[in-house]
Each structure stands twice: as structure tokens, then as C-alpha cells.
Image (tube, rainbow, N blue to C red):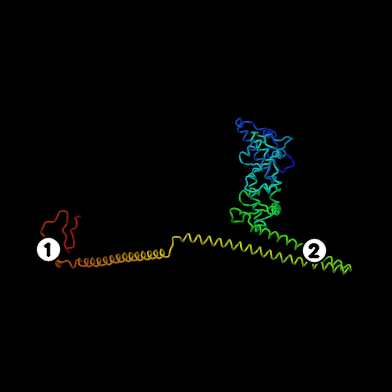
Amino acid sequence: MSNSTEMTPPPDWDDDERMNFMFSDFKENRDVNTTDWDSKMDFWTALVVKSCRDRGTVCVNLQELNKTFRRKEKSPLGLATVLQSMARCGKIQRESEFAANVDCGWLSWGVGLLLVKPLKWTFSTLLGSGRVPLEESFVVIELVKEKATELLRVYRSSEFASRSILSFQELCALSSDVCVDESTMCMALLQLQRDKQVMVSLHEGEKIVKFSQPGQDRVSTVSDVDIGIYQLQRSEKLLGERVEKLGLEADKCREEAKLLLSEGKKSQALRCLRGRKRVEKRADNLFAKLETIRGILDRIAQSQTDKMVMQAYQAGVSALRLSLKDVTVERAENLVDQIQELCDTQDEVNQTISTGVTGADEDIDELEEELKSLLDESKPDSISGLPEVPTKPLRPSREPSLPGYQQKKITSPAKRLEPAQ
């Protein structure tokens, strides 16, 4: 493998037998041996993506791949077929075609990046040739989406997150740890513009990038207000740099005056001090202008906040009006009257039910009293028509005794005959 790349070789890179198979060309007809054809295609497809990810780039061409995968002075013979298959599957796309599909003036802000020859591939495709130009650049779709997501994350976590518009140079400096070169950053910006997350435009010959803010589904077009805010922010930055530079210059004059005074050059020291006063005066004037610009920016930020609050209020009023569309005072009073009437009806029903149960309890009490009186009347001492209990002994009866029974002395009419033993 070429030493010019930092890609980690696969585990079986030193297996000569397997690598001889992988470095061989593809069969013209896949149906001859589908398993071997697919196995080789999967191997090189994964390796192409891995090599780009290891190098931190999102673009690849056949010439670079031949150098990257060179082994024992040999290059793979089937890489052109691999690129064609990846293009058909949508895993890669020609760089020029990828940029042209984005609804933006990529030719204006991408000059110097997309210096490819798109017609070369187009003509070969129209003529039926399967040959892939060595210098034709392709974008790996999976990797460019990853870079776009990472670039957006870096912007939103940076000090520029409060600014919706950045210059192209500021964005390059910000994304230096994410994108290895300007080409990679431009591809990531194209993907973000395709996703409606950024808007790249030209202002007075300068490329500026507008990002979508948190809570927005898509970025809005660059308006005159945006340009005005961008110019104010740019002026703030320039004035701040000049004030800082003048401060350093004033300190330098003061140190020179001290040095000249120590050498006995009083007149020259006085000139240095006068120069320091002039520098400080310019710095004070610039600082006053800087404070004015900062005040304007603060008011703009406050007005944007007020606008957002007003929009929220308006949305709330609209929602409330819609929710109360079918609600009127008359309907509310009618509903309250109906509820009160139903409550009164329920109270009457409950009272009726409770009264009926109480009456039933009173009837039961009367019946129990009557039953008690009947029991009292049915006691033995109150039973009439029965003879009195004799007090003298009875004479034995001459009537024959009943078989199986012994005749005993009757002492009480309550005694009964007992069976014979």
C-alpha cells in the first residue's frame, strides 16, 4: 500500500492468495460467478469508503485509488468497475453533478474547487463507453453527510453561534479541525445547502454563509437586514482590532519614552509622549464609535427578540380565537342552567329514595311490635279451655294396660307414657 496515505490496511492485506484474487479484474458477466463477483465488490466498496474516512476527505478519483491501494508494485484492476457500481447504487456521485443538483450559484462561489472536466465523463457515457476518467472526482455521499453534520455542530458550539452570517474565511478558520481542505468544506457546505441548513451567497465580491438558527427548519434567504447586521458586525470586529492595535502602539510609545528619559534624551522622550497622547486620542475616538456600533447591535438583537415574542403572542391569540370559535356567553349560560337543573333533579331523586327507605323501616318496626304482642297472647297461662291441674292422687284405672308399656303413677298431666323395659 502506498506510504503517502494514512489508511490502515485491512487484516488480510498480507494474504497473497486472497489479494491476488482481489487485485484481479472483474468478469464481464456477473452471472458467471455471482458469489465471487459480489464478494470482491463488497471488499473494494468498503475499502474505498474507509480510505476516504481515514484521510478525512469526502472525494475520490480513480488515479488516487490506484496509488492508495498499490501493493507490491501492482494496482487493482477492477477499481473502475467498483466506481461504476457505486455510482449506480447512489453511494458516490460525480463532483460536478453533486454541485449542480444543489439549488445555488455553485459556479460563482465554487470556482477553484470544481475544476474538473464533467463533459469528459458525459460524452463517454453517451457513447456507451464504460471507461472512468482517471481525474474524474466523485463525492462519497455517506461521508459528505457526516462532514456536513459535524460542520453544523462545530458552528453551533462556537463563539459565532449568535451570528447567523459568517464570512468564508471565518468559516474556513472555524472548520480547520473538521475539514482537511477547502474542497472538503465546500462539499460539506453544498450538502448543508441541499438540506436547507445554510445559504451561500456573494456580497461585494465576498463569499458569505448564512446558517439556520436553532428552532428553524430551514434557513431563510439573505435579506437586506442580514447584510446590514453583517456589515455592523464586520465593522465592530475591525474597530476592535484597530483599538487593540492603537493600545499596543500607545504602550510602545510609553516604553520608548521611558528608555529615552533614562538615556537623558528628554526632548525625544517628550515627543514620544506627545505621540502617545495622539494615539490614545485616536483610540478613544474609535472606541466611542465601537461602543455606538455595539449599542446598535444590542438594539437590533432586542428588536429581534421583541419580534419573536410578538409572533408568539400572535400565534397564541390565533390559537385561542380558534379554540373559542364555537363558545359564546349565551351558550355558557345555557349550559350552566342545564347543569343546575340536572343537579336539582338529582337532589330530588336522592331525597325520594331516602324517604322510601325510611318508611319501610317504620313499617318493619310496627310489624315487629304486632308480632311481639301476638307472642305474648300465645303464652300457656293465657290459654283458655283447658282443665285445671289436679292436686289429689288419681285412682288406678281398671282399663287394661297397653302392650309394651308399664303403667306408672301419673303425677302430672304433662307426663307421658314411657316404653316398657
Q: Residue at x 72, y 36 (%)?
A: 71
Of residues 231 and 213, which is closer to you in this image? 231
Task: Give the label on residue 346, or none.
Answer: none
Quarter of the image for residue 58 reads top right
Of residues 228 and 299, which is closer to you in this image? 228
From the top left corner, tell me how far across and down residue 10 is, in percent: 68, 40
- Left/right placement of residue 110 relative to residue 405 reads right
Type of amino acid under label 1: Arg
Say whether marks 2 and 1 touch (CB < 8 Å): no
Q: Is residue 207 above or below residue 377?
A: above
Type of amino acid under label 2: Glu
Q: Residue at x 62, y 45 (%)?
A: 101
Quadrant for the C terminus in the image: bottom left
Frontmost of labels 2 and 1 is 2
Q: Residue furthest right?
A: 264
Cα–Cα span, label 2 and label 1: 161 Å
* Residue matched to label 2: 249
Q: Residue at x 51, y 62 (%)?
A: 317
Helix, strand or loop at disc 2? helix
Quarter of the image for residue 359 reads bottom left
From the top left corner, tell me how far across and down residue 395 is, in percent: 12, 63
Number of numbered discs visible in the structure rendering: 2
From the top left corner, tell me how far across and down residue 328 is, in percent: 43, 63
Of residues 13 and 375, which is closer to you in this image? 13
Q: Is residue 98 above or below residue 414?
A: above
Q: Residue furthest left?
A: 398
* Residue matched to label 1: 395
